[in-house]
Image (cartoon, rainbow, N blue to C red):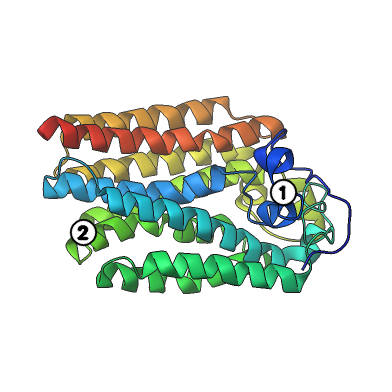
Amino acid sequence: MTDALPDQIVADAVPRNWVDAVAPRAWRPYLRLARADRPIGAWLLFWPCAWSAALSAVASGAPYPSLLLIALFAIGAIAMRGAGCTYNDLVDRDIDAKVARTRSRPLPSGQVTPRGAAIFLAALLAIGFAVLISLPPFAILIGICSVLPVALYPFMKRVTWWPQAMLGVCFGWGALMGWGATFGRLDAAPLALFAAALLWIIGYDTIYAHQDKEDDALVGVGSTALLFGERTQPILAGFYAGSVALLALATSLAGGGVLSFAGVAAFAAHCAWQTVRLDIADPALCLRLFKSNRDAGALFFAGLCADCLLRL
């Protein structure tokens, strides 16, 4: 499955990450393909799922979110983020070979063959499917409906300036899952939560896309970073403000208390800090701000959980 090439560190990997340091050498190309050396993507996929589980606990009066759901969502986020990265790299391997930041990734560099990547993708999808069928029937149906946007996402940069919006649909889908698993239906609260996640994701992925805007322009693919350009900061403020308003609406519709709204406020403060701090001409700063959204997601989740505990 792997070509007989020397072990090659990926240019955009986190320095001194655990894959490069301790993983068996034969596994490293596949772990890099799944971005196991960069867990931020799994966190960002996990948080909307966790928000939904916690919001449903607030609405139902439970003392804490379902630990089973949280565990399943964590496993699913890791597996499906890896599957998504593998699928995306298979589709984009020719483009990645032309971009300085991505040409050393396992597929364009030849560390993994397309056939090997396809087999690895099938294994990750099997794990994701096992997680999905462990959920209640209505949540399984919601999960199945996410297949089409996930399949379309890698192609969006070729036809639109808004691939970040499709990523928002894919990564935000989990905002529907916890509520659907708990109540067996969808209500206004999870729909508002999904819309909040969508705007949040467009915002943070625009920050991320500013790292590649020159290469994207040369290759001929679209992104909101290219579309917004020097207007990114005020537009980002608008997306984040919309996300905060929708989080507050979702919290209100679910009957959240003061600590839930404190979580919304903490999330808002973090987003405001990102917006003020942003310098689109500094790729390293853009990456740090993008990664900080792990903490933004945790702040809102913590507020929901604290609200549940306060009621207990």
Residue at the spot x=63%, y=55% of the render? 34
Q: Residues within 10 Å of mark 2 (few under 14, many from 20)?
A: many
How many neighbours does mark 1 have within 10 angstroms: few (below 14), some (14-19), or many (20 or more)? few
Picture residue at 36% right of the left edge, 51% below the top = 71
Task: State the image coordinates of residue 223 (x, y, percent, origin top left).
Answer: 64, 54
The residue where tag 1 is placed is 24
Whether residue 193 is visible = no
Q: Secondary structure at mark 2?
A: helix
Residue shown at 57% from the left, 44% from the top: 39
Residue 97 in view (yes/no): yes
Query: Which quarter shows the N terminus?
Result: bottom right
Local SS, label 1: loop
In front here: 227 or 158? 158
Q: Amino acid at mark 2?
A: Thr
Tell me the number on the disc at residue 182: 2
**Residue toward you, 62 or 98:** 62
Label 1, label 2: how far apart the Cα atoms are: 40 Å
Up-down relation of residue 136 to residue 182 (above or below)? below
